[in-house]
């Protein structure tokens, strides 16, 4: 995927300012930056939830700027949300069955195919198994603890068979053990050939999982490089520490 | 001259709309509840005034008592019904409110029967006539009462602690709670004020049309929302302006012969168009 | 006997209406308090086609369903801009406007309505009440079966997804506008069918038949039975058609009782008498260890 000088402003406020970077196939790229740096806005622009004010986004050589969210998802970009958003009143299994119907939603076969068909159920169970959720298949999604809901959201996005997965702060609110499980899961997904773009606050998590990092601050890209390059980059340190001093350590 | 005459009609009709819509707008501003049952209170106010005036023979006592009782009744609706469903999806309180409204309406029918009761009063206000232009005593009464109420309301909202509390609650309920405002009492107060005004409106319409009947609130209930939508949800100033605007649109379009829709449908059309294309109304702030 | 048959016809028509509102509100989460408007569009279309334009009933039937579905889709467009409580206000407004239009259009008979709407004929002879009863029951059964079948298909999954979370649904390739319009159109098609059945049984229709009160009535049925289930819609419709006929006070205080039902069900048993999560429904299932029970009892 290629992001080319993407800008998004809301009225006078520039949330994303001419940001460019690439993700190559099979890569795991982390997008970091202090609160309000424009990371989630960029996600929403990529997935078509928000319209870019200017700039272009290409995916697999095709332009996806301006396409609708469901079309972009169908082209192979899966995502999770910053605040977990499983379909709460569906069971865990039903959550996975939704994206498995992606071939039908544009056709009248939506009337003829059933999510209860064996292939879908077994596919869904496989996905749940790899997310360590197969035991919870018949529970209501909203009843799961947050760690499981996060994995459910990722499994749900994987059901689209995406080539690129966008993860918005998957480790937020997780305890040590849950976050280890999650890391393992993400690495497994990545090694199966899915590219991943990851937003994260937790620097320890990022450093241990990604090979390349892009840093945003106030909507602009201020650095790009390997974890060790980023850790020693003075602008990055300033962006993080500068905030910390102003706000009074809020573990940004 | 005819236009002058119409302008009096517009002012009178608009005043009624404003009196009803102000309460709705206040309640929506704080709770995000579309309080359809407000029109049930409007009818309640009319019946209470009619009954009390029948006993005491004094219109002013009837109007005051009716406003106070209706106000309390409105606060009770908040305390015993809405309070429990505020955390649900916004649809839930709305449907409950619709249910409540038809319950109230049918209760009036059961108690009073499906009849139109005449409600005539004598005022000391003279008939004003200049050439062919005139203002009837009842029209004058409505304009005067509305004027006094709007001035009073402006004073209460802008110069008293009650007003500060109401504004704080409308801005951010949790924040208001956090800074020590008694939000439950403040919300109950908003319901009280709004309901009292609706009762006054009901009474005035009853007197003006010389009839009070159980279903007098049925189009009013939704038409008041037209005003609130037009004025922008939660904006009291907007509601006042929108009330008179809607009245002007209705009166002028209906007097224009050959207009294809009845008066009540105009309001609903306006509402639909606004909700779809201008959901923040003419004067409202953007929501969320 | 004719009286019972008539009630059966009403129950069938209201069953179709309740199920059709349930598709829109229960499955797709688009709450409408103006469903009677679509009922009216179906009735008036079919009546005008047969009475004013001389169409045969069997030609008017599909046309009235189709036209109502189109009107429904059109109304559905508003749901792309307005959500939840604002959408409800719009549907209420549409109900009032439609009734006003019918009242003021001479072609539709104005306030006096349309008279002399013919009964459909079978083998050259107009159906009697007995035959019409089975005709209506047939359509109601068809509706139940069709919607039951539909509820097992991916279309239902798409509806549930947009009901739960529009943004997440889009991210899962479900086009929210498309399925909202589908929901409105399918729901309207059945409302149109109900309108057709009503018009050709009654022979006379008035704008007042399709007022906001009727919308409330339909909503009460599904709220009472349990929003989102076919059994709830059928139960609510049949109960609220028969109850007033057998309990005097229910018919005297009809609107009062509807209002109270709505308020109390929403406050105390939000999933209705027969909804998936309601105490009453679970209670009837205690002896059958279905998976639904297992699902509900966890946590």
Image (cartoon, rainbow, N blue to C red):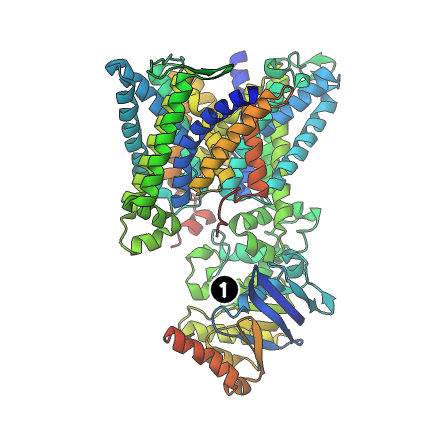
Q: Position of residue C172 (x, y in %)?
A: 60, 57
Q: Position of residue A218 (x, y in %)?
A: 53, 71
Residue B264 found in image quarter? top right
| Up-down relation of residue C2 to residue A89 (above or below) | above
- Marked residue chain, label 1: A
Check disc 1 and report the residue beneath it: A82
Q: Position of residue C108 (x, y in %)?
A: 66, 18
Q: Residue at x 54, y 12 (%)?
A: C2
The furthest residue to the front: B131
| Up-down relation of residue A237 to residue B198 (above or below) | below
| Up-down relation of residue B249 to residue C266 (above or below) | above
Q: Is residue C252 visible?
A: no
Disc 1 element:
loop
Q: Residue at x 42, y 68 (%)?
A: A173
The quadrant of the picture occupied by the N terminus of chain B is: top right
| Up-down relation of residue C278 to residue C299 (above or below) | above
Nearer to me, A190 or C75? C75
Nearer to me, B262 or A192? B262
Q: Residue at x 31, y 21 (%)?
A: B48
């Amino acid at each position: 995927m290629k992001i080319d000088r993407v800008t998004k402003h809301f009225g006078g406020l520039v949330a994303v300012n001419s940001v460019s970077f690439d993700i190559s196939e099979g890569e795991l790229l982390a997008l970091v930056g202090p609160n309000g740096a424009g990371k989630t806005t960029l996600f929403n622009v990529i997935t078509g939830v928000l319209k870019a004010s200017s700039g272009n986004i290409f995916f697999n050589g095709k332009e996806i700027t301006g396409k609708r969210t469901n079309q972009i998802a169908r082209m192979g970009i899966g995502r999770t949300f910053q605040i977990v958003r499983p379909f709460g009143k569906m069971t865990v299994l039903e959550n996975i069955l939704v994206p498995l119907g992606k071939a039908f939603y544009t056709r009248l076969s939506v009337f003829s195919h059933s999510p209860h068909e064996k292939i879908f159920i077994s596919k869904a169970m496989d996905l749940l198994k790899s997310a360590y959720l197969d035991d919870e298949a018949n529970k209501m999604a909203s009843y799961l603890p947050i760690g499981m809901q996060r994995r459910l959201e990722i499994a749900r996005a994987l059901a689209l068979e995406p080539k690129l997965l966008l993860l918005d702060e998957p480790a937020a609110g997780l305890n040590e053990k849950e976050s280890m499980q999650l890391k393992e899961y993400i690495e497994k997904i990545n090694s199966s050939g899915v590219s991943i773009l990851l937003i994260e606050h937790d620097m320890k998590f990022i450093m241990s999982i990604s090979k390349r990092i892009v840093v945003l601050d106030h909507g602009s890209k201020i650095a790009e490089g390997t974890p060790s390059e980023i850790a020693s980059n003075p602008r990055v340190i300033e962006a993080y520490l500068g905030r910390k001093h102003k706000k009074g350590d809020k573990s940004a | 001259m005819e236009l002058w005459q119409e302008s009096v009609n517009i002012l009178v009709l608009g005043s009624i709309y404003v009196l009803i819509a102000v309460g709705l707008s206040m309640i929506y501003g704080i709770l995000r509840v579309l309080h359809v049952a407000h029109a049930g209170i409007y009818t309640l106010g009319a019946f209470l005034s009619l009954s009390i005036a029948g006993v005491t023979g004094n219109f002013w006592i009837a109007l005051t008592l009716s406003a106070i009782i209706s106000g309390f009744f409105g606060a009770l609706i908040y305390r015993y019904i809405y309070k429990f469903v505020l955390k649900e999806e916004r649809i839930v309180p709305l449907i409950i409110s619709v249910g409540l409204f038809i319950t109230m309406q049918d209760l009036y029918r059961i108690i009073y029967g499906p009849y139109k009761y005449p409600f005539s009063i004598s005022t000391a206000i003279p008939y004003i006539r200049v050439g062919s232009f005139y203002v009837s005593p009842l029209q004058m009464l409505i304009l005067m009462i509305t004027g006094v109420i709007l001035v009073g309301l402006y004073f209460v909202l802008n110069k008293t602690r009650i007003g500060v509390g109401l504004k704080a609650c409308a801005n951010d309920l949790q924040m208001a709670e956090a800074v020590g405002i008694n939000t439950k009492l403040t919300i109950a107060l908003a319901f009280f004020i709004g309901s009292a005004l609706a009762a006054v409106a009901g009474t005035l319409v009853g007197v003006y049309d010389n009839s009070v009947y159980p279903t007098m609130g049925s189009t009013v209930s939704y038409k008041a929302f037209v005003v609130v939508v037009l004025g922008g949800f939660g904006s009291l100033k907007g509601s006042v302006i929108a009330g008179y605007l809607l009245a002007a649109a209705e009166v002028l379009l209906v007097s224009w012969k050959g207009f294809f829709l009845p008066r009540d449908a105009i309001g609903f059309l306006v509402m639909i168009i606004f909700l779809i294309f201008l959901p923040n109304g003419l004067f409202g702030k953007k929501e969320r | 006997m004719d009286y019972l048959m008539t009630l059966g016809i009403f129950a069938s028509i209201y069953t179709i209406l309740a199920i059709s509102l349930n598709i829109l509100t229960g499955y797709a989460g688009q709450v409408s308090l103006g469903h009677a408007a679509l009922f009216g569009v179906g009735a008036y279309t079919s009546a005008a086609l047969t009475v004013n334009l001389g169409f045969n009933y069997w030609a008017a039937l599909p046309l009235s369903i189709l036209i109502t579905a189109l009107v429904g889709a059109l109304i559905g467009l508003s749901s792309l801009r307005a959500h939840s409580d604002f959408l409800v206000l719009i549907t209420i407004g549409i109900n009032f406007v439609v009734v006003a239009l019918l009242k003021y259009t001479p072609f539709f008979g104005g306030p006096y309505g349309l008279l002399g709407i013919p009964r459909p004929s079978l083998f050259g002879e107009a159906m009697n009440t007995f035959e019409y009863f089975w005709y209506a029951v047939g359509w109601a059964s068809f509706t139940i079966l069709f919607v039951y079948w539909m509820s097992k298909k991916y279309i239902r999954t798409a509806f549930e997804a947009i009901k739960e979370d529009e943004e997440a649904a889009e991210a899962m390739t479900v086009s929210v506008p498309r399925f909202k319009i589908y929901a409105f159109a399918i729901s309207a098609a059945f409302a149109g069918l109900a309108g057709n059945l009503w018009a050709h049984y009654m022979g006379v229709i008035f704008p007042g038949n399709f007022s906001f009160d009727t919308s409330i009535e339909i909503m009460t049925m599904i709220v009472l039975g349990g929003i989102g289930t076919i059994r709830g819609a059928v139960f609510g419709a049949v109960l609220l058609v028969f109850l007033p006929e057998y309990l005097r006070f229910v018919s005297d205080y009809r609107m009062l009782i509807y209002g109270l039902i709505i308020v109390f069900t929403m406050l105390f048993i939000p999933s209705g008498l027969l909804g998936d999560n309601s105490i009453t429904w679970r209670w009837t299932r205690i002896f059958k260890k279905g998976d639904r029970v297992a699902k509900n009892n966890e946590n």
